[in-house]
Each structure stands twice: as structure tokens, then as C-alpha cells.
Amino acid sequence: MKKKKEKEEMPTKKGSWPVQILMTFVAILYLFPLFVIVNYSFKTKKELYLESPLALPKSLNLDNYRAAFDKLNMGVTFLNTVLYTAVSVFVLAILCGVTAWAIARCKRKFFKFCYVYFIVGILIPYQALFLPIYIIGYKLNLTNTRYGIIFMYIATGISFGVFLMTSFMNTVPIELEESARIDGCSVYRTYFSIVLPLLKPAMATLIIMQAFQIWNDYLLASLYVSRNQLKTLTVSISSLFSAQSSDYTTAMAAIVISVLPIAILFMSLQKYFIKGMTVGAVKG
Amino acid sequence: MEKKMFRQYLLLVIPGLVIFTIGLIVPLFLSVRYSVTSWDGMSVEKPFIGLKNYIDLFHDKEFIDAWWFTIKFTIGNTIIQNVLALLFAVALDSGIRAQKIYRTALFVPCLVSALIVGFVWLKMFSNVLPAINDFLGTKFNFLLFGSSDTVLSGLLIANNWQWVGYWMLIYLAGLQSVPAELHEAARVDGANAVQRFFHVTIPMLAPAITICVVGITTGSLKVYDLLVSSTKGGPGRASTSVIYQTYTTAINGRQYGYGSAMTVTLVLALLLVAMLQVNTLRKKEVQM
């Protein structure tokens, strides 16, 4: 890739500075709303009413963060969200990996059918089916339970995971697996000791994609968990939006708290994540 | 031996199949089943009324309006997001400095929940941007969520702010896999930059374009979270999407049968659009 870059720079170098300036402008535009959120989250009530929304706060006071913690019962909601996201993503990572591997390696018709079957879930996003998903949750007593919402996050996330992992399997050299098999490895051991370590970039993509979808989910969480002790961050933050109060400095602090974990996850896995995205885009 | 392996592979697939079937496929059939009843969601009986719900849907002005809004929102998104994402990707790939910083800046908004994006842009339009007007002495109308004429553009801005970076990343990955020799050869043949873009870059990006177009379309058809915190479907019903309308009808209005019929229409539309797009785009890929 590096090589290609050097070659290509020749003709584009001339236009490079205007592009650089333009993209800097675009990037600032994109970051501006994020700046606004953080800026608001430190403002006092007085600053909110008397000064321009653009003015910086005089000091970094954490009152809004404290208020957000108390009002949204964050000790509970934050942990709930961490629990739902972590468990669902963990199960999805294992499940999608083995499912995709079996689909990619076993050439029988049944597995081809399985692939198409899973893809249906990408074409029909679960949001479109929220009503029957709610009804079935009600019938199976899954609503207002922790395992119920986790089950649904797994069920709705599996399509994308299998799709991503299957398209990645072709990059795993089959010869390694075959020699392991000859040495007497079972199918399961082959997967966990040979294949899985090679799937790191794809796994990182899967983890980030699913984690930020589940962490940010509103529709499913608002339908499935209405009890206060089970609520997620996004759902409890929405209570600050709907109240007609002008108390949105607290809401902004809550937003910062809710975005931070997922941003940190992204930053730490970014290197792998970009690699994983490449596979899908190139292969189609 | 082969039979044993088949059985082992089967065991790997079955848990996923079962969970997926219960969580998504069974609900899919449930919605078809309920759509021919007048069930209210509470009573044990589910009176069968045939296709009445579907016939009613065709005369339901609110539902048709919801579809109109959803279609306009989807078309707007598909065009704007694809064009911007591709342009930004090309700009970042042109060898500018600190490419990674720009990439991250554009990508980060999609890590924020759509619910939060709606709220943030509500405040942007109502408080922050008017303050910029005051500051610069200009008189732009930023109250986009306030009128039914501008609410669509406001939502498009918010949605594109959130998602352009994500699709840009996919285009960027596609661009970086275009072999340099192709550009070289085209240049030798006397193609200028614009010609090279349309005759070399775009055809080579075909798989990425398929992913982005299908992804953006299905993503826009299911819009809901964004509306809850920003416009609440208003002003009036100007920004009520199909899912928003289904939610109001079924959950708040306790018309589960009728709501299920709405769900079925959306599912059919999603399938149709996806098939159509994949087919035409795939054909293009082959031709090139």
C-alpha cells in the first residue's frame, strides 16, 4: 500500500493544499457539535441563561456530571448497559465465529441455505420487526428480564456477524487447518487453536460494530426493559429529553458519560477495526 | 469420517440458527399472522378479519404520509451520504497529511446513539446556530425543526453528520485496494484526472458501492430513534416515519393487528428494495 501511495502522490500533489484546507474545514464542522456537547456539560445554570451558547465556561465545574449521576441512577443504569453489551458481544463473538466457519468450510447445500437464511436479518433490520419482537418477548416472558434483552441483542446481531465473519474466512489459509486435522485435532480444537487467532481483525470489527449498536440501542431497550432497576443508559437519558425542562446541561453531561466508554473502545481497537472493514468493502 | 465432520459442523451452526429463528424469523411470521386480525394486544381472542387491515392501510392518510416522509428521507440520504462519503474518501486518499486525524474526526459521530444525535441537533438548530447568527450578524434561518417545510432538511443534516464518516471508511478501504498500475496505465493512455475517476476508480469501487447503497437505504427506511428525541414526528406529522407511525398505532393506540399489517408492508418494501439494488448493482459490477 505504501508503495502505491508514493506513486500516486505525483499527480495529486499539486491539488493537495486546497484539499487539505477543505478537509480541515470539514473536520472542524464535524467536530463542532461534539465540542458543543462538552462545552454545555461544564456550564453552570447562570452561564446557560446569561451567556452565549458559544461562550466557554469559566471553570470546569462537575456539578452537571454529579447531577446526571444522581438523576439517572447511573450506578445502576451504567452497570446494566455494560452488562448487556459485554455479555451480548461476548456471546456474539463466539457464536458468529463458529457459525461462519462451519458455513465457509462445509460445502454441503444445507450450509449454503444457512448463509442465505442469516442474511435475511441484514435485509430486514430488527427495527422493522419491533412490534412482533415485542409481542414474542411478552409471550416467552423475556420482557423485563436481563437474559431476555441479552437474548434479543444476540438474535438481532447474529446476521451481521455471520456475514462479516464468513466473508473474512477466505483469508484464513485452509492448509493450516488440514494439517491440524491430520495431526488428529477435532473440529472444535482446530477452530479455537488455529482459526480463531487468525480472525483478530474481523473479531475487532465485530466487537466494535456490535458493541456500539447495543450500547446505543434505544428501541429494543425501551420496549423490553421498563423497570427502573433494569434500564439502560440511553433509555434513562431519554427521560431528560422528554421532560420539557430547560435543564439540558445535565443531559449533555450524561451524554458525555455515555459516549466515553464506546469512544475508548473504538480508539483502542481502531487499528484492527479498519483492517476488518477493508475485507468487506473489497470482497463485496 | 466425513459424516462425523458434518455432524460436528452442524453442531456449530445449530445454536445460532435456533436463536436467530426465535428472535427474528418467528416474529416475522407472527406479524403476518396478526396482520389479518383485529387484535388489541390484550384480549385472548384474535378475531380474524381477512385482508381488511391492508385495505384500510391504502386509505389511511396518516400511513401514506408516513411512507412519503420515509421515502423522501431515504432518497435524500442515499444520494447525499454516498456522494459525500465518496468525495471525502477520495480527498483523504489523495495523499494529504495526517489522514488518520481526519478519518477519526469524521467517523466519531457514528459512535453516538441516534437518540442523542437527535437531541444534540435540536439544540444546535434552536440555540447554538442562532448564536452564530448573532455573532456574525447574519440572518440564516436555523430553526429547521420548527416548520414542516424544512424539517426534512434538518433531519438529513443530523443523519448525515452521524453516518457519512462510517460509509467513508468503507469507500476509503475500497480506494486503497485499487491497484496503482491501473491509474498508471490510464494516465499513459492520456486520461485526465476526471476520466480516471469515472473509468478506473468508480468501476473498481463497485463492491463498496453495493454495500454502501444497500446499507444506507435500509438504514434510512428504519429511521425512528432520531425522531423520538428531535421532532417527535412533527411539526404536525411532517416527520412521522413508518416505524414511528407503527409505534404510535400499535403500542400507544393498542391496535396490534393493524400495526402488524404496517410492519408487513415495511418488511416487503425492505426486501423488494434490497433485491432490486443488489441485482442492478451486481450486474454493473460484472459489466465492468
Image: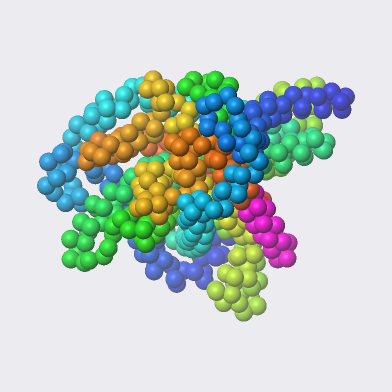
Identify the residue shown where x is 21% and y is 66%: B138
B200 to A195, vertically: above or below: below
Q: Is residue B277 magenta?
A: yes
The image position of residue B97, as x and y in percent, is 42, 58
Q: Which quadrant of the figure contains the N terminus of chain A? A: bottom right
Which residue is painted at 54% across and 40% down in the image? B259
| Number of on-image labels | 0
Q: Position of residue A269 (x, y in %)?
A: 49, 37
Measuring from the top left, give residue B228's x and y in whole percent: 39, 43
Left-right relation of A193 to A247: right
Highlighted magenta segment, given as a residue range? B270-288
Does the magenta run of residues contain B104?
no
Splitting the image into 4 quarters, where does residue A37 fall?
A: top left
Q: Nearer the viewer, residue B42 or A110?
A: B42
Question: Can you see residue B227?
Answer: yes
Q: Is residue B211 left or right of residue B284?
A: left
Using the image as rendered, state which of residue B253 and residue A276 is in the foreground. B253
